[in-house]
Image (cartoon, rainbow, N blue to C red):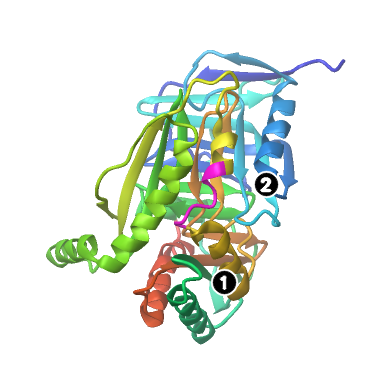
């Protein structure tokens, strides 16, 4: 029998600038308002696909955990060994699981470090550096803008025919640079410009999502649902008026209600009762405002503990990224969208040894492949949608990544 592998968590004390600690261009990140987790180095990684990918992910994670001897002097959420996960939108695509060699976490005024192996505690000094953005050239993604608007029109026809109630259609853009793209600069820019979002990176997928799909912490589950969007002007008085119009918009409220019902119904499988507010609030981000609802619940006490993997299997895909009814909407996406989403709109985040964790929906993001990055944006299509307006909304949703690519630090 092989000797157990040492995993050690130690307290660091001071609040640390997490994204400035990353020492190489293959970072792992889950950071919001300066708090969260970053990781680097690869202890183990795997890809999985298929309809059972969440169960297979659990099996692989538990297999890895059996080989660990864990010493944790902090005993907090996010300490001990951590699995960074980026699941595909579609079962047919690859999902990526990574166990980093080093994880640094910060919450409030406290920070900690976890490392795998018998070596001494890793040195965190000397990793901060200045990064310069390369020049990018841009081109259409899988389909052109007019083609995409035509697809939206077809989706509206399918809704009118009663085939579906709502469907989310996405599109992509591609940016090319003369050299390899370093995601650390993108992460820093996104975190600075959109601090209230979850800034993530797993295996080249980098972004800043405003949508928390699932937080499970000691039996309490939370999901933040976003659906319904309006662009900000930068004028506070005008934006307040726009927020009020968003909150009254029948089209946006209909889209939002589908998404909330989808999440609440999925969580009801695990929670004897859930708290679903009667109406959404308006979430203000730097460039847009969204209708938002936080759905919460306490998971049932069962002989076999309910973990993140169990809930993900029911929760993904929600109406916020697929549509209603789910199976019918997925078929419309496959018929109309014309592109591979890969891990865009899939669950992304981290999971700990207890099966707790935080995962968002991979939105406002791009997939890096050497010197190219493919950006994604999607819109919820309902009966009141207008193709030109949906295209304009998708353009706004590209802006966070476009600006993050073009700034230097």
Residue 264: where, in percent of width, then height? 41, 43
Q: Dot 1: few (<14), some (14–19), or many (≥20) neighbours within 10 Å?
A: many
Q: Nearer the viewer, residue 361 or 104?
A: 361
User: What is the C-alpha distance between the residues marked 1 and 2?
Assistant: 23 Å
The relative height of residue 206 versus residue 41 in the rendered view (above or below) is: below
The residue at the far left in this view is 237
Marker disc for residue 175: 1
For the question of whether residue 5 can be seen, the reply is yes
- The residue at 65%/35% (across/down) is 100
Report the front residue among 217 and 373. Answer: 217
Mark closest to the chain's N terminus, 1 or 2: 2
Answer above or below: position of 261 versus 165: above
The disc label shown at residue 10, or none: none
Q: Which residue is mark 2?
A: 96
Q: Is residue 366 above or below residue 48?
A: below
Crowding near pointer 2: few (<14 within 10 Å), some, many (20+)?
Answer: some
The region drawn magenta spans: 314-320
Q: Is residue 272 left or right of residue 276?
A: right
Q: Residue furthest front?
A: 162
Look at the image and tell me in which quarter the N terminus lies.
top right
């Amino acid at each position: 029998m092989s000797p157990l592998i040492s995993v050690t968590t130690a307290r660091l004390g001071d609040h640390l600038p997490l994204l400035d600690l990353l020492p190489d261009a293959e970072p792992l990140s889950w950071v919001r308002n300066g708090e969260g987790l970053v990781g680097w180095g690869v202890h183990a990684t795997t890809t999985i696909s298929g309809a059972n990918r969440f169960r297979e992910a659990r099996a692989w994670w538990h297999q890895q955990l059996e080989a660990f001897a864990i010493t944790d002097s902090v005993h907090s959420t996010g300490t001990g060994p951590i699995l960074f996960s980026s699941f595909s939108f579609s079962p047919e695509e690859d999902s990526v699981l990574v166990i980093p060699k080093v994880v640094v976490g910060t919450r409030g005024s406290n920070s900690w470090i976890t490392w795998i192996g018998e070596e001494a505690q890793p040195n965190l000094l000397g990793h901060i550096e200045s990064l310069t953005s390369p020049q990018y050239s841009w081109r259409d993604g899988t389909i052109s803008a007019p083609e995409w608007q035509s697809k939206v029109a077809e989706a509206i026809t399918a809704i009118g025919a009663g085939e579906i109630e709502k469907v989310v259609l996405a599109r992509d853009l591609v940016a090319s640079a003369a050299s390899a793209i370093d995601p650390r600069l993108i992460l820093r820019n996104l975190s600075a410009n959109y601090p209230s979002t979850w800034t993530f990176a797993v295996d080249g997928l980098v972004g800043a999502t405003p949508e928390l799909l699932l937080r499970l912490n000691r039996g309490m589950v939370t999901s933040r649902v976003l659906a319904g969007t309006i662009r900000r002007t930068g004028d506070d008085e005008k934006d307040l008026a726009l927020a009020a119009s968003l909150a009254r918009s029948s089209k946006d409220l209909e889209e939002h209600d589908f998404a909330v019902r989808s999440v609440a119904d999925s969580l009801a499988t695990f929670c004897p009762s859930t708290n679903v507010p009667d109406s959404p609030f308006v979430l203000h981000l730097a460039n847009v405002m969204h209708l938002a609802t936080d759905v919460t619940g306490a998971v049932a006490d069962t002989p076999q503990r309910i973990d993140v993997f169990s809930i993900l299997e029911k929760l993904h895909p929600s109406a916020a990224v697929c549509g209603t009814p789910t199976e019918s909407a997925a078929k419309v996406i496959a018929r109309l969208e014309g592109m591979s989403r890969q891990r865009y709109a899939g669950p992304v985040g981290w999971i700990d040894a207890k099966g707790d964790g935080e995962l968002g929906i991979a939105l406002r993001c791009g997939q890096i492949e050497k010197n190219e990055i493919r950006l994604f944006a999607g819109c919820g299509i309902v009966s009141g949608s207008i193709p030109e307006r949906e295209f304009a909304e998708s353009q706004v949703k590209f802006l966070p990544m476009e600006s993050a690519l073009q700034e230097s630090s």
